[in-house]
Structure formats: structure tokens, C-alpha cells
Amino acid sequence: MKWTLAVAIPLLASCAAGQGSGAFYLKDGDRVVFYGDSITQQRLYTTFAETFVVTRFPKRNVTFVHSGWGGDRVDGGGGGDIHLRLERDVFAYRPNVVTVMLGMNDGSYRPFDQVIFDRYSNGYTELVRKLKERLPGVRITAIQPSPYDDVTRRPTMTGGYNATLLRYSDFVKELAGREKLDLADLNNPVVEMLRKANAADHANAEKIVPDRVHPAASGHLIMAEALLKAWNAPAVVTAVEIDAKARRVASAQNTEVSGLSSSGTLEWIAVDGALPMPVDLDDPVMALAVKSSDFTESLNRQPLKVTGLADGYWALRIDGRMAGVFTAKQWAEGVNLAELPTPMADQAARVHALTLRHNDVHFTRWRSVQVPLEDDSYEKTAAAMKALGELEAEVLVKQRQTAQPARHRFEIVPSTAAGAELPPGFERIFNGKDRTGWHVSQTNHHGNTESWTVENGVLKGTQDKPGHGGILLTDRKYRNFEVSLEIQPDFGCDSGLFLRANEKGQAYQVMLDYLEGGNVGGIYGERLEGARLSQANFQPVWKKGQWNHLRARIEGKRPHIQVWINGTRVTDYRDTANHLADGAEDGMIAVQVHRGNRWVPGGFHRFRNIAVRELP
């Protein structure tokens, strides 16, 4: 399988395409409240925006409160009328920055109606007046409402409901000009992205706003982009240019580079001032949304440019981990590290996990304790709220600590064209020539067949005599990792991909049972007491009689295993405990030939392009 990545990016371009000049909108000490309806209550565009600020400006102390309530209109809703909502969910936090996104419910999901619109415009104007009155000097970002999806599905009314929302959006823009508010358009950029996504992949484009109202994470990411661009967010995470021939750092932006040396490999130390935005491109819907937008160019550029390298292929390692392999020409043009599996991306993902966690705690305090019990007189209510508030504060401290700059060791080392064909971050563990780096288990209960052969880059396994199988193990052990390989089994062959295996073959097994009633991609605890079985619906994505790509990821003390077949995730398995023998947290990778009659006579299971990416 050929993997490609667009890597040419101009290093010295302006900070962000389409971005205004000047400093970022949020300053040290700002307190932000996101106010809105169920789309804000989803806590997705808001948490993406929060994580961006925390990772891009780790030294700034900016706090965020997410106060969306499903069904809200400009006069309030299920959480109370506008007076109660503002008093309890905005003013109580004494913000100096407030964002407001309302309109989806206000339009009543019908063609434009002047009476309904007047209620919205008058109510919105009054809401702004109240904010300014109670919060002198507050900076308000009025958000033009996110779209109703009339792109991927046929409109339900003449002109579509989003046409109504655009009329409301025009009013918000006019009000912002009149009241000197800041303005963010979360409608048009999402619609434009939906159009491009729909043209490229209709089935996944429909999933970006699955119910036409509430975007999935992919849609919210583009909404967050629109808000951040309105706030003049910087596009560049860090930017480094190194002249390998002259052995000097030509330029470094938002990072400290030191210790540059060259002795067959190019090495240096960097301490970055920011982290890339964590984006889950394993999710095909998210990947489609990013590809159909300018998110990367506008907000997530981390160019590393290395000139003066000899022709050929060069790999980047960071802290000893493979990040990617590119040609000397690609390095000279610039590689966007934000698109690679780097330690910096892992760190940013940990920050985002803490962003979500503190918001979950806040939501529990607000919606499970404060609001439902506010009219009761329980003795412990105040103590419960205080404890949850302190817990959230503790999580926030950890979030900020996790975002702080870290020291990383970079290496540019010679590589090969074969390395460039792998997904970024992966390294081959099967050389395509022989079994170097692998060995046959002599203690596995399936047997110890030696009928593992290598032909034309393909590892072939079969029973050396009827009923006699076995496993082939890597010589080294792995802890958290992804394994990528291609498989082509003969029908009737029962095999497996073993993860964290010991010498006996006790392991979490990705099942490769290609036979009647079989299971390809599911999880089985091979000789693991208590591990549950997981089935995978692999048939819709399986290519009969062809090579199929499989990728499996295992991570965590309590194993979390995911499996993709031909790019589609077919398994997301979380065990209840670590059921590995003796509580092991690492082990070998193995492939299997099943013993007994679960193997068609003379059949083979074929494996090629086996590679591993180690995870933190």
C-alpha cells in the first residue's frame, strides 16, 4: 500500500491565510463564557477552541466556562428564562469575554417569518444590553449561527432552513457593527466545507452533521476554526529551518533550538513554545472535514525545513521514535510536523483529554447538582458543589502543567524508499527477505511448525503436517503500539495477529479467521482467563481474493484495542481489566497457523509490509 502526504509548505508565508494582522484576541487573565443552545452544550467547538488556546499559549492564564443549554432561544428555555440563565450561567463567573451563539431554535425550523424574526432580533438586542450593563467592559463575540445541513440532504422546505438562518446571521452581523461587538461566522465556512466534502465522499459527508442540526466533532472542528480565526489565531505552531550543509540553524520561530551537530546524522535539541492542534485523522469523517477545509493551512502549521541534504530518503526521529520518511527534496520544501505522529502531538492529545475531563466535571456540578437541587434544602448540596469545583480546579492545574514546553531530541537519519512507503511513524519489522527478527515458539499449544517461508516479500504460514500449527513471534517486546500489515489468506484458514504475546502465545488476538462463520478483526483472549470475545463486521470492507490492509492499536494498562480494515475501524475494544498472564503490560507480536482442522489442507495465510509504530 502506498502512503503519501502533502508536505510542501512555504516556510516564510504570513502567519495565517485570510487572517487579520495584530495580536491574538484572548489575553492573559481573560475569563471566557461560551453561551448558547444545544450546539454549544455539545462542548465540542468550545473545547476545541479551549485546547487550541491552552496548547498555543501555554503561558497564558485563560479560563473557560461552557454554558450551553439544549433548546435555548434568545429568551431562554429549559434551563430557565433569560434572566435566570444569565444570572446563574454567565454573570456568576464574572467573565470579561462572552460568546453568544443562538438562532437554530429561534427560527422554529420553518421558512422565514417576520414575527418570529422580530422576536429573535429584539431578544438578542436585549441580551447584549444586559451583558454590557452587568459586565462593564465585557468583550462580546456574536456568533452567526451554525448551519442546518441542506447540503448533503434534500431541503425540507423551499430554499432550505439554512436560508432562514442566514437571514438571522445577517442580523447578528448588523447588530455586531451597531453595538461594536466582535463577530464570528460559523455558518458559511461550514457550508463551504460540506459542499467540498459532499462532492468528494457523500456517505461520510452526511455524518459531519448527522441530524442536520448538531455537528459531529468533525463539523465542530471547522466551527472552532472559524471562531479562532475571528480571534486572530496564529497559524504557525513552530517553524524551523536548518541548513544541513552549513550545519547551522537558519531560522527558528516560537522554539529554542540548540546543540546542532552532524556526524552521519543531523541532530539537535528543541524546546517548543507551543503544541500542534490534536486532530484525530484516524476518523475518516474528521479526515474528510479537514481535507475539505483550510484548517491545516490556517491553524496547524509546524514546518520543519532542512536544506543541504544529499539526494535520497531521510527519516525524522524525535526522542528515538520514528516520525516519518521523506526525500531530500521534500525536506528542502518543508514538512508539516503537525500532520505527523510526534511526541508533541501526543502531548497535545493529553491536554485535550484534560480539557474534556474538566468540562465533564463542571457539567456534572452544574447540571446534576446545582440546577436540579437549587430549590431544595439538602444539607450537603453546597459541600458537593464545592468539592466538584475543587476537583475541576485540580484537573485544570494538570491541564496547564501538561501543556508546558518539553525538551525533544531531533534526528535526521538516512532511510530508504521502502521506509517512505509506510504510514508516517511506522518502521518495518519484517524485512521481506527472511525471518530475521522473528522466531518460532517451541511452547505454543498449536505446535511449532517450521513451515514459515518468505517469497517475494511475502511471509507465508501453513501447517507442516495436517493438524500441526504454531506461531511466529518477534524477538523483541512492545508495550503501546500500532501494527500495520497486509494480509491475504486462503479461505478456510484460521489465523491471528497476537498483541503483547508471551512465548507460549498467551495474548490479545486480533482474529484472522477467514472461514465459514469466521471473524476477521475481532478480539479474542488467547488463553487469557476472563477476557471477553469481540466480533467485527468485516464483510462490508473486505476485498475477497485481494490483499487487505489491517491496522491494530493496543494501548493502556487496561488494554484498549482498535482495529481498522482497509481504513475502516471495525473494532473498538476496551477490556474490563488486564487479563494478560502475570499482569504483563508488554509482549511480542505474533502471527499464527491454527492447529487441527481449522486450516484448509494446503492453504496459506500470507502477510507482507509488517510495520510497527510505537506509542508513548
Image (cartoon, helix red, strand yellow):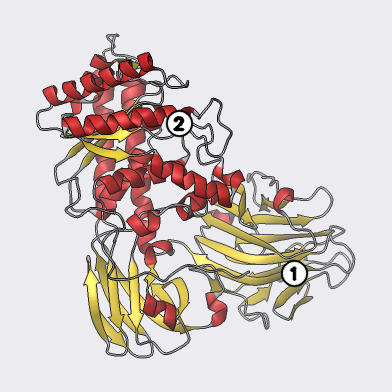
Q: Nearest to the eye among marks 2 and 1: give it.
A: 2
Disc 2 marks which amino acid?
Answer: Asn
What residue is shown at x 85% (from left), y 67% (from top)?
A: 603
Q: Is residue 373 left or right of residue 599?
A: left
Percent across and percent down for residue 514 are 79, 56
Quickly name the residue at label 1.
Answer: 606
Q: Residue furthest left?
A: 136
Q: Secondary structure at mark 2?
A: helix
Rendered image quadrant of residue 178: top left
What residue is shown at x 64% (from left), y 66% (from top)?
A: 485
Quadrant where the C terminus lies?
bottom left
Is residue 559 something one can see in this rendering? no
Quickly name the residue at label 2.
Answer: 162
What residue is shown at x 37% (from left), y 69% (from top)?
A: 9
Towards the viewer: 531 or 181:
181
Disc 1 marks which amino acid?
Answer: Arg
Quadrant where the N terminus lies?
bottom right
Rendered image quadrant of residue 181: top left
Q: Residue furthest top?
A: 376
What residue is shown at x 49% (from left), y 44% (from top)?
A: 194
Q: Secondary structure at mark 1?
A: strand
Query: Vertical placement of 165 versus 24: above or below?
Result: above
Is residue 499 something one can see in this rendering? yes
Residue at mark 2 to residue at mark 1: CA–CA distance: 52 Å
- Mark 2 or mark 1, which has the lower sequence index? 2
Percent across and percent down for residue 128 are 20, 25
Percent across and percent down for residue 513 are 76, 55
Label 1 packing within 10 angstroms: few (<14), some (14-19), many (20+): many
Towards the viewer: 344 or 77:
77
Q: Is residue 320 left or right of residue 98?
A: right
Percent across and percent down for residue 235 are 30, 58
Query: Vertical placement of 310 versus 18: above or below?
Result: below
